[in-house]
Image: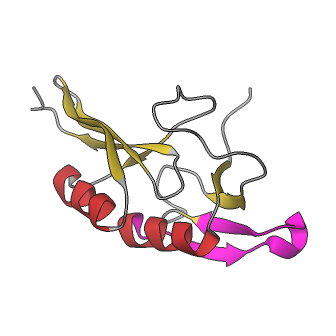
Amino acid sequence: MGRLIHFEIHVDDMERAKKFYGEVFGWSFQDWSEYAGMPYFGAVTGDENDMGINGALMQRQGVKPEANQAVNGFVCTMGVGDYDITETKILENGGKVAMPKYALPGMAWQGYYIDTEGNIIGIHQPDANAK
């Protein structure tokens, strides 16, 4: 079985990306550049006992995604406790709305944003009363 165990977010400006993901989601970072042979920072996304995975910010090796381009890779969606507070943090830290908040009726609130590096990310707040 091929269970997802790690992710990489490609970035142009490592410090800007670390600030964005650290401020918005509370992630911490470990410098693994020596192992990767390029700027590469492991991202600790939460407590090891909670559901989820860790990943990394990786120096982008190609061109940045263009505005309004279709997704040509994966989109990472982060589970959040308060959708509206998280959206405010995203916008205050340089992110932009890609697809505004909408209800997954009886399940959750969902929306998509563009991070400071031009990548699309999602946020998801479980809520059985969403409609």
Q: Closest to the observer: 108 or 123?
A: 123
- Residue at the (61%, 57%) spot, across then down: 54
On the image, the x and y values in percent for residue 62 come to 76, 46
Residue positioned most to the top: 105
Which residue is at 55% across, 29% downward? Answer: 71
The vertical placement of 6 against 68, above or below, is below
- Tell me: residue 28, above or below residue 80: below
Q: Is residue 10 left or right of residue 36?
A: left
Determine the image quadrant of residue 111: top left
Q: Is residue 36 left or right of residue 13?
A: right
42 part of magenta stretch: yes
Identify which residue, 14 or 3, lies in the foreground. 14
Q: Say whether residue 1 is left or right of residue 109.
A: right
The residue nearer to you, when weighing 5 against 33, is 33
Numbered range of the magenta stretch: 25-43
Q: In this rendering, is residue 102 above or below 55?
A: above
Residue at 53% across / 71% down in the picture?
Answer: 16
Left or right relative to 23: residue 89: left
Q: How is the image coloured?
A: secondary structure
**Residue at coordinates 50% horizontally, 60% vertically from top-left?**
49
Residue 127, percent from left and from top: 18, 38
State the quadrant of the C terminus. Answer: top left
